[in-house]
Image: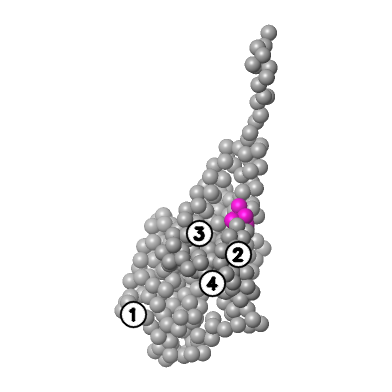
Amino acid sequence: MPSVERTLEAPDVDARPLRALVTAWIGKYGALVFLVFLFVFFSIDANYFLTTSNLLEILNEAALSAIISCGMTIVLATNQFDLSLGYNASLSGIVVASLMSGGVPAPLAIGAALLVGLVIGMINGFLVTRVGVNALVATLGVGSSAVGVNYLISNGAAVTIPSLAFTQISIGHWLAVPKDVYYMAVVAVVLWIVLNRTVLGRNIQAVGGNAEAARLAGINVRRVTSSAFVIAGVAAALTGILLTSIVGSGQPTGGDSYTLSAFAAAFLGTAVLHEGRFHIVGTVVGCVIIAVGFNGLTLLGVVTYVQYLFSGLVLIAAVSASSLARQLQRSA
């Protein structure tokens, strides 16, 4: 005969379906909830945060980071990493500034800087796919080499651009919207199409899901992975060129910090609509989140080091949440 205590106990409930639902919801909407939270918080505490001019400024601040982050997303989608992107951007900025200061026409200088980014991407792809070097080690080594070339060209000093016309590439507005926002939109749309509507994009996602299965299915894993590194390298070079246009000079360390923000944005993007997946729309949202945080903290008068602390904590939280979500999904 069952005891009274036993009969009063609640029936056992399998918590796994609920846990899976919560995990899926966080994976799809977690970053969007965080973005809404930041908007509400800064709208209450920061003056002028919700003005049209400030919201456009937030998009402008996110633009260059989004361009290089979208390139990072392509590499991450193949389940690889690229630590050279920030150094690539800095070197490309120095190259375009040095060539223009030496009398080379702007179109040729820009083309040469883009070629630098492409070559860096090719070297990364070669080391990872042909030599078999771990992507973290290979791209860090290539990035360090890029720093050396950077300082060889610039002697560690800023390189001023003699042409004011070049600065108009980024500075100014079209239809009241900052020019860099248009560049961001074009790059994001193009890379979204590449990743979602082309054979290369489908192969990139297949390689990132399971490289061995992709190889057995007839996909050239080496070529696909190398292509991802090349795309990322060109995106980094474009970022460096636009940054040089904004500043009016090539800065030896101008693009170095973009690597951290690119990782943070891409991992934040895995919690936007497609749980655990690197995708372009999510990355752009991640860049906007970081820009909102920086902008709001600036309006609140917070000192600069807190802004970098915010960026670092966002990266840690995004990577941790992404890893935890994957573990919960496997155990659900």
- Point out the tag, 2 or 1, that comes first from the N-terminus: 2
Residue 157 badge: 1
Q: Secondary structure at mark 1?
A: loop
Q: Is residue 236 magenta?
A: no
Residue occupying image coordinates x 58% and y 60%: 41
Residue range of the region highlighted in magenta in the rendering: 30-34
Who comes first in sequence, dot 4 or dot 3?
A: 4
| Secondary structure, magenta segment, majority class | helix
Question: Residue 228: in sight, yes or no?
Answer: no
Amino acid on which disc 4 is placed: Glu
Q: Residues within 10 Å of mark 4 (few under 14, many from 20)?
A: many
- Give the alpha-carbon distance from disc 1 to disc 4, as whole Å: 25 Å
Reply above or below: 302 against 107.
above
**Between discs 2 and 4, the one toward the N terminus:** 2
Residue 207: percent from left, percent from top: 56, 54
Is mark 4 in CB contact (under 8 Å) with mark 3?
no
Instruction: State the count of labels.
Output: 4
The earlier-in-sequence mark between 3 and 2 is 2
Residue receiving disc 4: 61
